[in-house]
Amino acid sequence: MNTNISIKQLIIFSKVVSYGSVTEVAKIVNLSPSAVSKSIQALEESLNTSLINRTTRNVSPTEEGVFFHKKIMLILDDLESAFSAVSSKKNYPSGILRVTCSVALGTSQLMNMFSQYRVLYPDVNLAVNLSDNIENLNEGNYDIALRIVNKPPENFAIKKLAMINWKYCATPEYFRKKGIPQKPGEMKNHDCLIYPGLESAWEFSPDLSSSRFLRENNVILQANSSLALLEAALLSLGIVYLPTYLSGDHLKKGDLIEILKEHHSQKQHYLYAIYTPRQRNNINIRSFIDFVSEWLSPIPPWERVLNG
């Protein structure tokens, strides 16, 4: 193989044969006529054969030129297809998208999100890390972190996707045994199921900020898993404070009953998509975040279940 021959030379030669004019090709490839002629001459020297018959009025391929043109057109067509395929692939979501999120969100909602997303983008495959630990995007091999937090981390690109609503609830069976608290102060007589770190949600504020009622004897269960707390609540072990993406279906069906509807934690939690700034133009990341943002707007599906 002659490595002195460039693709550019082959393209120029093929166009000269097709148009029969050096001047016309020079305009098309944005070169001077002399540069086009020099490119053809360099190609002929590399092949040690004459490819073009030159006259004062036009140019035409020699016998060797016709043969060579026919052969290289197959190559150039394949190259054009390859370039188009790569360009299309780059501008269309495909390959693996790596997402990390909490176990509860991933189990209850992420699979539904992805199934809808994949209808539009069937060439994307999902690799999921479900963890209730906050995974570091800089250390883990993740494209996107879906996190429910009061305040997103700094130094990352973020997209606020939805506000997460929470409900105080328990089963009808639990309330038959213990009664239904009508105001926060009555909660001190009830069994509570607590997620560590969310104790402030049980202090009812701002008007009842002094109504702290959590005591050792009424926190009967602490678990760092919302799914575990949901299961405990459904077993009538006590009152739980759960996001509606977990509790919505059970509230709708009557498995759980909401209480203290007028009282909520001061801290608002939101679902964020978080990714590294260098991935801002990644087509997989952009398409997934845009899809999820639209899927959750204006009201997340789990909220529509409650409001429907």
Image (cartoon, rainbow, N blue to C red):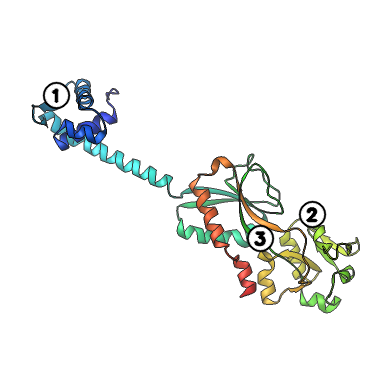
Whole-percent x, y for residue 28 in the image:
23, 36
Label 2 sits on what residue type? Answer: Gly
Q: Quadrant of the N terminus?
A: top left
The structure residue drawn at horizontal position 46% and vertical position 49%, both measured from the top left corner, is: 94
Separation of marks 2 and 1 at Cα, in angstroms: 81 Å
Label 1 sits on what residue type? Answer: Ser
Give the crowd class for mark 2: few <14, some 14-19, many >=20 residues within 10 Å: few
**Which label is found at residue 163?**
3
Q: Is residue 76 above or below residue 163?
A: above
Left or right: residue 32 versus residue 291 is: left
Query: Mark 1 sits on what residue?
Result: 50
Left or right: residue 162 versus residue 4 is: right
Helix, strand, or loop for circle 2? loop
Comes first in the chain, label 2 or label 1: 1
**Which label is found at residue 110?**
none
Query: Mark 2 sits on what residue?
Result: 197
Separation of marks 3 and 1 at Cα, in angstroms: 72 Å
- Taking depth in this image into account, of 157 and 166 the one nearest to the observer is 157
Helix, strand, or loop for circle 1? loop
Whole-percent x, y for residue 57 in the image:
8, 30
